[in-house]
Amino acid sequence: MIEAKNLNLFYGTFQALNDISMKVPEKSVTALIGPSGCGKSTFLRTFNRMNDLIPGVKIEGEVIVDDMNVYEKGVDVDNLRKRVGMVFQKPNPFAKSIFENVAYGLRVNGVNDEKLIKQTVEESLKQAALWDEVKDNLKKSAYAISGGQQQRLCIARALAVEPTVLLMDEPASALDPISTSKIEELIHELKKKYTILIVTHNMQQAARVSDHTAFFYMGSLVEFDETKTIFTHPVKQQTQNYVTGRFG
Amino acid sequence: MKKIFEKVIEGILMLSGTVTTLTVLLIIFFLFKEGIGLFGKSPTEEGFTVAVNRENPVNELSTDQIKNIFDQNIHNWNEVGGNNDSIILFRMDDLFNYYTEEELAGIDTNMNLLTSKIDEVIDKNKGIIAFISSKEIPQNPNSKLIHIKAIGLGSFFGGKEWFPTAQPVAQFGVYPLLMGTLWVSLLAILIALPFGLATAVYMAEIASPGVRSVLKPVIELLAGIPSVVYGFFGLIVVVPLVQQIFALPVGETGLTGSIILAIMALPTIITVAEDAIRGTPRSVKEASLALGASQWQTIYRITIPYASSGITAAVILGIGRAIGETMAVLMVTGNAAVVPHSILEPMRTIPATIAAELGEAAKGSLHYDALFALGCILFIITMIVNLTVQMISGKRTRNKLR
Ligand SMILES: Nc1ncnc2c1ncn2[C@@H]1O[C@H](COP(=O)(O)OP(=O)(O)OP(=O)(O)O)[C@@H](O)[C@H]1O
Ligand SMILES: [Mg+2]
């Protein structure tokens, strides 16, 4: 169960998130939509404390992951990030081989058993629907495969450390339609095991892949409901305008 | 109209490019022309020769042999392939040991008298070896000129003695200088590398913007300090320190030079390495952190490998700086031109030698040519260093493009 409670976030004096409370359902896909700059990425990154890296960030309220407030003092951030995986907008593989990219998360978390690593790498690549395409080239540089394959590699890399939550920030926005549909199929598969939060600008994509949708506007959560409801008869006029495209 | 204007600009650009290239080529040309002038010459000072008794079977001696003879390390002709006669050294001044002042009256003005007296001495002493002005020789029936082997690449690079003003033959062995340069520079890099890298990582990855905004200008200031000032610092602080710590008779050692050079190479290493480390994309670092890697794991598993070619370039640029540095090294290394056995001995580097000796070497003399030859060696070393940097940074751009 992951949840935000009265969450405020400031970049210096600028308030990027405004009193957000939201319960994210487990083992399902929740889409975050909203116009550019409304705080979707900022919100997403509070779940694995990625915002910590930005100087001058101040956070109030609670973010609950596995029944624990992640912003409490003494929380092991590295361990949190192991449980809450993340896939970024642009594919960002390491300058290592395909195999080592997937093995990385295991190695930094102290796994030394090469047999176990090999097995996990294979499983993760299979889960990310990439295994068949790269199984003969595991030693090849991760830069030598296509952008769509790289993004699936990044998903495999995140899956290898066995998270319970997967954060995806516009994971398909840099990809062609075929790669995009592969990623969408993949998300559909993955929600059986993982709680997925996905940011997207693509309404059809949100409608296709998500079970629930949250509409953000200027740092506030305007409406959060089942995807069907949001796209057919939302309660708020703002949401209506946005999902029908009558909105900036 | 516009066309013509553009053509003119193009012409100017091409011209300045050509002029620059030509200047560089000319510098290289003259450096090597003077430097190569050393080879094939006799190592005796111009106007002087070495002569022996006509009946002495020895015709040719190497510079080493002559040096050992005049240093009285060799006492008998049979050691250099001659008869069993002990060697008698003779220099111009020694004439007064063979004749009374009355016998030599007027010798300063009477060239013939001088010549005949020298010839007489050579005739009387079978084992003599005379270092004399070459003007007297042609008329001397009883003496024979010794052929001295010319300076070659072998004796230049292999010679273990650098003694450019030695009489009767100068010694131009660059081996000790080359070793001094390499020892001092390499140790300097060994010292500078860990500190430089640590500082670069700290500045790029850990320091807060406030700390960085103080550190950065300080390090740039370090790069701007003239090397004599480093030399003074070395003399006043490092020399006594090294002397005390290692209980040495003198503190001016290779190690002292290395420490000063390391300090001098630090700004280069830090700046270039920091740039390289900062060049690691944020997205890859975030990916690592997002997988649960700690900041340190991210630094040494992702950031440093990603920046490795830039870091290598930093190191090589640092080496280049160390190898070429003159003044500070001259002041603190002790400048003994001997083949080093330990880093705690005084050493002498090539640039320091050139700087120290160029003032006293007469233009066109052997010594002068030898210093230019040293310049050529330095040039070649620096060129190798620069080519290596280019190769590495070339590889880096190729990697980035992929
Ligand atoms: N590092 C930062 N420092 C200061 N302000 C920031 C920072 N990152 C984001 N912001 C501001 O916070 C607000 C929310 O940004 P955020 O990136 O979360 O938007 P977003 O909804 O993800 O937009 P997009 O759809 O364009 O990705 C924006 O107004 C942005 O300018
Ligand atoms: Mg965003």
Image: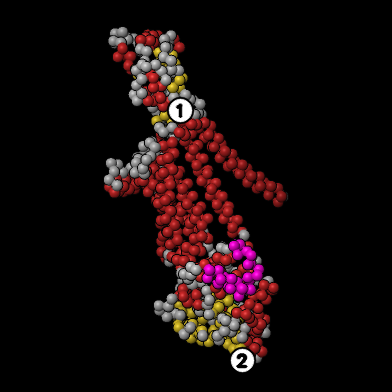
Tell me if residue B11 can be seen: yes
User: B121 or A118, which is in the foreground?
Assistant: A118
Asked whether mark 2 lies closer than 8 Å to ligand 1, one says no
> Label 2 to label 1, Cα distance in Å?
98 Å
User: A7 or B120, which is in the foreground?
Assistant: B120
Rendered location of residue B367, percent (x, y): 44, 29
Magenta stretch bounds: A115-142
User: Looking at the rendered structure, which numbered label has been put on residue B46?
Assistant: none
User: B108 or B93, which is in the foreground?
Assistant: B93
Amino acid on which disc 2 is placed: Val
User: Looking at the rendered structure, which numbered label has been put on residue A235?
Assistant: 2
Residue that appears at 45% across and 33% down: B158
Furthest toward the front, the residue is: A115
Q: Chain of mark 1?
A: B
Tell me if residue B134 can be seen: no
User: Looking at the rendered structure, which numbered label has been put on residue B366?
Assistant: 1
Residue that appears at 41% across and 52% down: B192
